[in-house]
């Protein structure tokens, strides 16, 4: 029953937090236009790349530490990872200052606080705190949307930059709030320099191989946007990015189920009740649902899509399908 309950909470949370950005799409499409949306997608791609190196998969390192060693000394790993992020992010900010690039400065800061927030979410997930996890997600999405609307209504120029700035402010507010709540409920313990060094080596040993893992997903899923932006133009990238974002609705359901199952999966693998053959069988069954979303997208009239996004997004249905 706990698994079903957590799955329901995670699903509701994922749908609630993700539906807000999707509901914001018609507003963004009309405010930014095709070219502006393409430019925004390009910068979000760079943000995803920065997160890989600045974050070094700290959320995964924290989760693995919890599952293997428990929550004792968990603060050691969390704080060490945060110091790493601050140091590497500080170097990135220095480069932005030397390059006189304000937009890159926002992206580096965004990456840093996105890492902080993902670690806080990971703590709640591995401790099976479904409700706090969901509240953090929903708070982040609502704050993000409200700040975006506020920024785009106040300013009339450089709207893409204002959208990125609103995401940054939202990440800062929610990440700090989540961290202070966590610190209030955790036991403070002093650690030695040697222990911090060991924790740093643990994060590095876990995170460096994960660069290739996340890098492969970045290459498969997002690197093409960089080539489209430089090889074609912002309008082409805008159509492509909008189609990809709408098509990603399916991933919301998959991610919600994954968030609920991961703690129980690791627990049952450790007990031996879940075997490799069972995982292979479940993976094969999952292939049956792959063509269904594409078939549904095929039968949706393009007029409906244009009604939501605006006439200037003509041709986006091709990318959705």
Image (spheres, grey):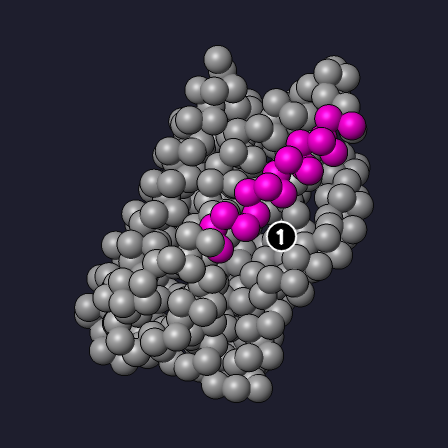
The residue under the point 74% across, 34% down is: 280
Using the image, determine if residue 33 lies above or below residue 91.
below
Using the image, determine if residue 200 lies above or below residue 234.
above
Residue 259 left/right relative to 88: left
Residue 203 or 131: which is nearer the viewer?
Answer: 131
Does the segment drawn in magenta span residue 263?
no
x, y percent for residue 190: 64, 29
x, y percent for residue 102: 45, 76
Label the magenta part by its dominant secondary structure.
helix
From this viewpoint, which residue is outermost toward the top? 1
The residue under the point 29% across, 54% down is: 23
The residue under the point 80% across, 45% down is: 205
x, y percent for residue 83: 62, 49
Residue 276 or 233: which is nearer the viewer?
Answer: 276
Using the image, determine if residue 200 lies above or below residue 212.
above
x, y percent for residue 274: 72, 21
The residue under the point 78% across, 51% down is: 209
Residue 139 or 282: which is nearer the viewer?
Answer: 282
Is residue 191 at all visible to an observer of this figure?
no
Is residue 301 at all visible to an observer of this figure?
yes
Magenta segment boundaries in residue numbering: 277-294
Q: Mark 1 points at which residue?
A: 55
Residue 70 or 247: which is nearer the viewer?
Answer: 247
Q: How crowded is mark 1: few (under 14 residues within 10 Å), some or many (20 or more)?
A: many
How many numbered tags mark residues here?
1
Examine the image and state in which quarter residue 99 appears. bottom right
Label 1 element class:
helix
From this viewpoint, which residue is outermost toward the left? 154
């Amino acid at each position: 029953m706990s698994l079903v309950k957590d799955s329901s909470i995670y699903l509701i949370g994922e749908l609630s937090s993700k539906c807000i950005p999707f509901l914001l799409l018609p507003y963004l499409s009309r405010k930014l236009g095709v070219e502006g949306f393409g430019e925004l997608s390009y910068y979000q791609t760079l943000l995803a790349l920065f997160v890989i190196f600045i974050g070094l998969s700290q959320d995964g390192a924290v989760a693995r530490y919890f599952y293997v060693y428990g929550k004792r000394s968990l603060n050691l790993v969390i704080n060490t990872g945060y110091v790493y992020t601050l140091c590497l992010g500080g170097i990135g900010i220095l480069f932005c200052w030397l390059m006189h690039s304000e937009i890159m400065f926002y992206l580096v800061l965004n990456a840093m606080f996105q890492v902080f927030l993902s670690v806080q979410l990971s703590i709640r997930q591995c401790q099976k705190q479904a409700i706090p996890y969901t509240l953090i997600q929903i708070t982040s999405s609502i704050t993000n949307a409200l700040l975006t609307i506020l920024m785009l209504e106040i300013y009339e120029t450089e709207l893409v930059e204002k959208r990125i700035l609103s995401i940054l402010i939202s990440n800062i507010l929610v990440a700090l709030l989540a961290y202070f709540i966590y610190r209030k409920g955790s036991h403070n313990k002093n650690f030695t320099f040697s222990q911090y060094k060991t924790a740093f080596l643990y994060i590095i040993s876990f995170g460096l191989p994960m660069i290739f893992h996340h890098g492969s997903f970045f290459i498969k899923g997002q690197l093409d946007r960089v080539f489209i932006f430089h090889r074609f133009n912002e309008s082409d990238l805008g159509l492509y990015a909008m189609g990809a974002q709408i098509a990603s609705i399916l991933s919301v359901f998959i991610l919600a189920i994954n968030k609920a199952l991961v703690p129980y999966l690791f627990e049952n693998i450790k007990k031996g009740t879940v075997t490799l053959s069972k995982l292979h069988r479940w993976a094969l069954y999952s292939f049956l649902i792959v063509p269904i979303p594409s078939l549904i997208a095929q039968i949706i009239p393009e007029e409906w899509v244009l009604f939501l996004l605006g006439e200037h997004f003509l041709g986006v249905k091709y990318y959705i399908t």
